[in-house]
Amino acid sequence: MSISEADKQQLLQLARESIRAHLKGEAVPAVAGASPTLGERRGVFVTLHRRGQLRGCIGYLEAVKPLGQAVVEMAAAAAFHDPRFLPLRETELADLEVEISVLTPMQPLAQAQVEKIQMGKHGLYIERGLNRGLLLPQVAVDFGWNRTTFLQQTCCKAGLPPDAWKDPDTRIFTFTAEIFSDHPGKPESPK
């Protein structure tokens, strides 16, 4: 799944151009002439930070669109449509950090297999009924969570009780992600 350094830089540039275009009311950037990797259908999340604080995060769980197009759409969505935040203002753009997480397909995990979850490597997606929640692999590391806390927090993100992951009606999925950022001090995902 490895993404070349050139493709990473192009995706980060597309994300920034998308945000700028939306701020100025201009056309979104075209992905024309991109490498074949940017044309592959991939799940992807765009996370925005400002001064070390989360500023927006939205993505596609599944491979529904070509990677380049998905990044353009999700960058704008993270900047302007994350319901947890007010829409991004132009004054915030200068110190905005962009992080992209390209996901692998979801893998089902039985409750009896939760010990296989590796902090920093696996992200979690939990669903029960209409409730769904996802946390990216880097979230557990950023907060210093252990496996149980990661499961509990993903349940809470889904609007479920913290121990809902133990319920046989709750479905648990893991995935990995290739994570990269335009923030120089932010480590990338392990290879």
Image (spheres, rainbow, N blue to C red):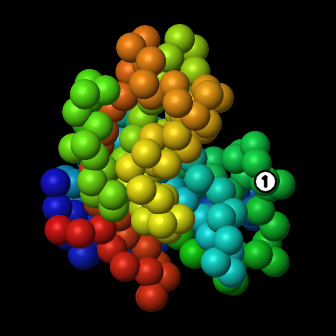
Residue at image point 37% right, 70% down: 180
Query: Residue 158, how many percent across, how many down?
Result: 58, 31
Q: Amino acid at mark 1?
A: Phe
Residue 13: where, in percent of width, then height? 46, 71
* Tag 1 secondary structure: loop
List the residue tagged with mark 1: 85
Residue 79 position, x and y percent, is 68, 57
Q: Is residue 54 above or below residue 78?
A: below
How many marks can you see?
1
Identify the image quadrant of the N terminus: bottom left
Q: Is residue 4 left or right of residue 187?
A: left
Viewer-proximal residue among 163 and 68: 163
Query: Is residue 59 in view from this perspective?
Result: no
Q: Position of residue 116 (x, y in %)?
A: 21, 44
| Quadrant in which the C terminus appears | bottom left
Foreground of the two, 68 or 52? 52
Residue that appears at 75% across and 57% down = 25
